[in-house]
Image (cartoon, helix red, strand yellow):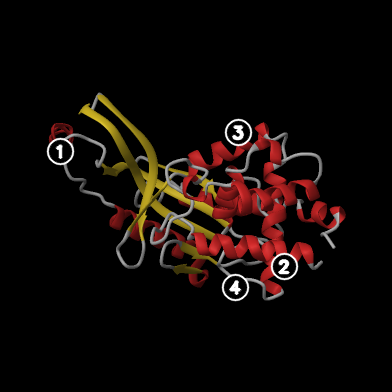
Amino acid sequence: MPIPESQLETWSHQGSVTQSSNTYNSIKNVLESSTTPYSGKDFRVFLQGSYGNDTNIYAESDVDIVIQLDDCFQSDLTRLTEDEKAAYKSAFRDATYTHVDFKQDVLSVLTKQYGSAVTAGDKAIAIDASGSRRKADVIVAIQFRRYFKFRSSNDSEYVEGICFWNGKGERIANYPKQHSANLTTKHQASSNWMKPMARVFKNMRSRMVDDGLIKSGIAPSYYIEGLLYNVPNDKLTSSYQDCMVNVLNWYRQEASKSDLVCANEQYYLLRDGHHTCWTQGKCDAFVEAAVKLWNEW
């Protein structure tokens, strides 16, 4: 039998907002303090992830925070001509305060404030939950630019994102602001079904992990949001049950899987061997497990 509408409606509810907001604001205040070693630098602090996109669920309590340094940046020049690449290289000089310096300073600030609750992970600095404070992950990033034209520093075109490095020294570039803005546009265009359905699918994921239908980590929230971003708006309509059936059938029967894009529209959604992409095998496994959960409820 199908999953009841009442269960899907319960799964559509947003998780804690007040605690997440308080956690974000308290950490933001620490990062923006006038006593930090980087207080005179050009930087900004903002949200990314499920809470920042209003797609968080009760089982998903982390608050994802980005602190981005704008005094230096890295670039993707692959779309430029050789003359444009030469113009770019002559227009800028190497930074004296780099991502390495910035991350060390941010880590020192957070450790001074939160002590042993702070751990430097592979990608983010984690701050453990304590009392009313939720667990938080702080990404220390610099500006990233994907250039499409460069004649001079005043005559250029690029898409701005963020970049950081993992523990192996591999650069990871992403576009959280475009992701968030595009999700909101999609949500509005789908008569406000998109974000509740993202929460439904995330809660289904938790249930499927508990039931042993999929392994933990196979379907990160970012990719679930990306999958729903590609669903035609006319599939998101009427009821949660209708939306669920339409989404699953669309993916299995209609979707051109190699053409699906991430919500930021800067990367393809399904590709193997890329930090910023979901493998199609994992996406297929997630969808098939959702079908099984639906049919055997």
**Badge 3 or badge 4: first in the primary sequence:** 3
Q: Residue 215 — which label?
A: 4
Q: In this rendering, does residue 162 appear at all?
A: yes
Mark 1 surroundings within 10 Å by alpha-carbon count, few (fewer than 14), some (14 through 19), many (20 or more)? few
Specify the label residue 207 is tagged with: 2
User: Which element carries disc 4, helix, strand or loop?
Assistant: loop
Q: Are marks 3 and 4 in contact (CB under 8 Å)?
A: no
Marks 1 and 3 in Cβ contact (< 8 Å):
no
Q: Position of residue 105 (x, y in %)?
A: 35, 57
Q: For mark 2, give the secondary structure.
A: helix
Q: Secondary structure at mark 3?
A: helix
Question: Contact (CB < 8 A) between labels 4 and 2?
Answer: no
Residue type pointed to by label 4: Lys
Amino acid type shown at disc 1? Lys
Q: Which residue is the site of mark 3?
A: 185
Disc 1 versus disc 3: nearer the observer: 3
In three-dimensional space, the C-alpha distance between marks 4 and 2, rounded to whole angstroms, equals 11 Å
**At x 81% / y 40%, what residue is drawn?**
238
Residue under pointer 1 = 89
> In the picture provided, is 155 more to the left or to the right than 107?
left
**Contact (Cβ within 8 Å) of mark 4 with mark 1:** no
Q: Is residue 136 above or below residue 214?
A: above
Picture coordinates of residue 239, whole percent (x, y):
81, 44
- Label 1: state its secondary structure: helix
Q: Is residue 226 left or right of residue 32?
A: right
For the image shown, how many numbered marks are present on the structure?
4
